[in-house]
């Protein structure tokens, strides 16, 4: 049974959820030592075990227990991520945090996931304030290429209603995308501190809506579908103890074109000057990685067209991002990076 809150995450619940990974394990004590609040609730739990099979000393319990979780639950993210960890990631050559148990209900659109304590593992989670060099970004793009190329083609791309096509809710009245595209909402976002760094040509709600209409049209015509991380921004990336990049927060996995992930990662990650210096070289390297991994062969010109076509999405969501998800300073940094990228590539 999926607990209704952290109060239900006790030794008995954890014992049951960890059986698949640690047969015969018995948790005798579970103490919550800290909480992280955002799109989901993540609680750091210290565990003690009975003699016999042993699990990690600490782990994170992740579930949809925030005040605003009901809205996000309706798009399926809390049921999707545990299933991604249990059913998809084990068959893919992609680095991700280890998981120690997963439960979900497609009917309830809910789930709980037990994840590795990355701090204890010596990993470093990145933020928009991290200074990321092109070498690290290159390695992260290789990870994305392995995900994309490894699932390209109808016989390798996971099917099922629980994984949605990119922007599948764009036509639905009342969807989040339609809400943030309303003129009054865009005016509100632009009036926030994050709006100070947005160039004049992207301060017009009509211009933003027109640019996103181009993104949406391109995505619908982009038939080279593969599995996408779906939320591969800088804050969902980390490096392990030996410096290898990887991605966390797999709750927005979807089907679509590779450039959605690549544009979202590169622009959110690199400083303005570093992106302008390295963007072309990094895209060329990604194309090589993608083909090696089983993806389509693309020319540099085709790649740039794909890449630029998805830039407005990153700008829109970081302009509109709630401070319950990311601090205002992060929203300001990343929204400005996407705005400048749109201008550089003639999308504004």
Image (cartoon, rainbow, N blue to C red):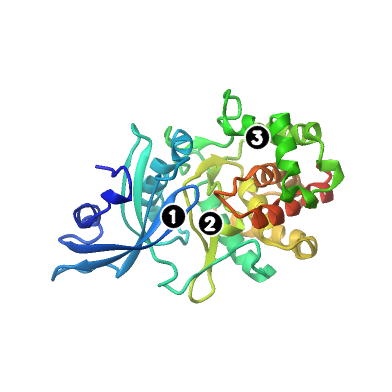
The secondary element bearing badge 3 is classed as helix
Q: Residue at x 77, y 61 (%)?
A: 272
Reading the chain from its start, which is encountered first: label 3 or label 1?
Answer: 1
Along the line of sight, which residue is nearer the eye, 5 or 129? 5
Residue 173 location in percent, x, y? 58, 23
Q: Earlier in the sequence, mark 3 or mark 2?
A: 2
Q: Secondary structure at mark 1?
A: loop
Q: Quadrant of the C terminus?
A: top right
* Numbered circle sitting on residue 92: 1
- The tag on residue 42 is none
Residue 286 versus residue 76 in the image, above or below: below
Residue 182, position as x, y percentages in the image: 69, 29
The label nearer to you, 3 versus 1, is: 3
**38 with respect to 128 (left or right):** left
All told, the count of numbered labels is 3
In the rendered structure, the answer to whether residue 206 lies left or right of residue 86 reads right
Residue lying at 71% horizontally and 38% vertically, measured from the top left = 188
Of the residues under marks 1 and 2, which one precedes in the sequence?
1
- Give the crowd class for mark 2: few <14, some 14-19, many >=20 residues within 10 Å: many
Pointer 3 local density, CA inside 10 Å: few below 14, some 14–19, many at least 20: many
Position of the N terminus by quadrant: top left
- Judge by depth and name the residue closer to the eye, 156 or 338: 338
Please, what secondary structure does the residue beneath circle 2 have?
helix
Instruction: Give the residue pinned by disc 2.
Output: 146
Q: Which mark is residue 180?
A: 3
Residue 228 visible in the current orientation? yes
Picture coordinates of residue 316 (x, y %)? 69, 42
| The one of 14 and 237 positioned closer to us in this rendering | 14
Q: Are marks 1 and 2 in contact (CB under 8 Å)?
A: yes
């Amino acid at each position: 049974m999926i607990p209704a809150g952290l109060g239900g995450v006790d030794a008995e619940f954890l014992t049951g959820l960890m059986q698949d990974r640690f047969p015969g394990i018995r948790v005798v004590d579970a103490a919550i030592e800290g909480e992280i609040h955002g799109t989901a609730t993540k609680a750091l739990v210290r565990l003690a075990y009975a003699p016999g099979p042993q699990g990690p000393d600490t782990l994170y319990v992740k579930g949809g227990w925030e005040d605003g979780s009901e809205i996000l639950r309706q798009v399926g993210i809390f049921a999707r991520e545990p299933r991604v960890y249990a059913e998809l990631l084990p068959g893919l050559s992609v680095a991700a945090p280890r998981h120690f148990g997963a439960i979900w209900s497609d009917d309830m659109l809910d789930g709980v996931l037990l994840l590795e304590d990355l701090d204890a593992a010596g990993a470093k989670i990145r933020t928009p304030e991290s200074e990321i060099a092109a070498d690290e970004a290159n390695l992260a793009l290789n990870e994305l290429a392995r995900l994309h190329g490894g699932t390209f083609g109808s016989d390798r791309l996971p099917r099922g209603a629980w994984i949605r096509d990119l922007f599948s809710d764009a036509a639905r009245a009342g969807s989040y995308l339609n809400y943030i595209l309303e003129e009054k909402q865009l005016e509100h976002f632009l009036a926030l501190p994050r709006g100070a760094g947005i160039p004049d040509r992207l301060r017009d709600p009509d211009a933003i809506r027109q640019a996103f209409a181009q993104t949406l049209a391109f995505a619908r015509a982009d038939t080279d579908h593969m599995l996408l991380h779906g939320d591969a921004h800088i804050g969902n990336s980390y490096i392990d103890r030996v410096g290898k990049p990887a991605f966390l927060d797999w709750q927005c996995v979807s089907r679509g074109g590779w450039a959605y992930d690549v544009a979202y990662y590169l622009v959110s990650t690199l400083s303005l000057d570093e992106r302008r210096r390295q963007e072309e070289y990094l895209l060329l390297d990604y194309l090589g990685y993608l083909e090696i991994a089983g993806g389509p062969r693309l020319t540099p010109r085709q790649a740039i067209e794909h890449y630029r076509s998805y830039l407005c999405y990153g700008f829109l969501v970081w302009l509109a991002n709630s401070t319950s998800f990311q601090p205002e300073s992060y929203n300001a940094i990343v929204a400005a990076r996407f705005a400048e990228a749109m201008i550089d590539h003639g999308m504004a």
